[in-house]
Image (cartoon, rainbow, N blue to C red):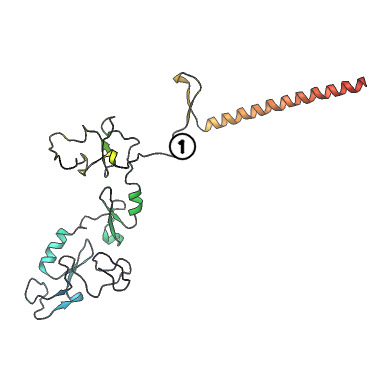
Amino acid sequence: MECEKCHRKQKSRAFCYFCQSIQRLPICAQCGKIKCMLKTGDCVVKHPGVYTTGTGMVGAICDFCEAWICHGRKCLQTHACTCPLQDAICIECERGVWDHGGRLFKCSFCDSFLCEDDQFEHQASCQVLESENYKCQSCNKLGQYSCLRCKTCYCEDHVRRKGFKYDKNKAIPCPKCGYETSQTKDLSMSTRSHKFGRQGQTYYDGDDDDDKETAGYGDYEENDSEEEDDDDDDDDDDDEEYEGTSEEESGNEEKQ
């Protein structure tokens, strides 16, 4: 529909998404009619010989999508059962339409509902695995299949459940949630990483494995102390050179 005040196109709803204004001619979300012209029919509110428009045609507001429903008995009984937003709860904040009061979106990766506040943040981190590698959740093999809802990888052996028949022409469902899996090589999946100093830089003092040490804050202190010792040695050498030159100058003066 197009709002009569702000002139913005949007989905059919009782109130405008943007300016919250009520439309002059409500549209039924089930049958799409604006005017009820039935003289005799399944209208809950009988109006023989009168055509109803506006709020006189409205019978209810859907609890899921907040759209107008006409006073026809068929629309009132069937729309709530087939409403596409009856399970539309944001996957991030777990709020429904009546809680956040905004628009609903679907993630293009995991096909979950998102509210207007969390859509960009969720889609930016949707293709990040919960683990730190691409290995299967049940073994150490490479995960060939990935579930975008569970954020886990499965190998060829563990993605298939025993005693379950799979259709060759359909994608293999996730053994945990039942959502369709995709091949990891076809996705832009990335692993979870920690960039706050948990893993230090390693270096080797010798050829043996026992000589491995991990660099950390203590290494910086040791390096600072070594630099200070080197500076002290340089100062001592400079003092000795200065004393040697002063003795030579005094010997030359005595000879003269």
For this orientation, the residue located farthest to the left is 40
What residue did someone put label 1 on? 197
Closest to the observer, 44 or 141? 141
In which quadrant of the rendered view does residue 149 lie? top left
In the rendered view, tell whether residue 138 sits above or below residue 170: above
In the rendered view, tell whether residue 68 sits above or below residue 121: below
| Left or right: where 130 falls relative to 205 | left
At 69% from the left edge and 27% from the top edge, which residue is drawn? 234
At 19% from the left edge and 66% from the top edge, which residue is drawn? 29
Closest to the observer, 217 or 147? 147
In which quadrant of the rendered view does residue 224 lie? top right
Looking at the image, how many numbered discs can be counted on the residues?
A: 1
At 47% from the left edge and 31% from the top edge, which residue is drawn? 201
Tell me where residue 245 appears, x and y as whole percent: 81, 24
| Left or right: where 70 falls relative to 107 | left
Q: Residues within 10 Å of mark 1 (few under 14, many from 20)?
A: few
| Left or right: where 192 falls relative to 256 | left
In which quadrant of the rendered view does residue 47 lie? bottom left
> As shown in the figure, which amino acid type bears the numbered disc 1?
Gly
Tell me where residue 225 appears, x and y as whole percent: 61, 29
- Quarter holding the N terminus is bottom left
> Which element type, helix, strand or loop, lies under badge 1?
loop
- Quarter holding the C terminus is top right
For this orientation, the residue located farthest to the top is 208
Tell me where residue 97 appears, x and y as whole percent: 26, 60
In the rendered view, tell whether residue 114 sits above or below residue 146: below
Tell me where residue 196 appears, x and y as whole percent: 45, 39
For this orientation, the residue located farthest to the bottom is 49
Closest to the observer, 239 or 181? 181
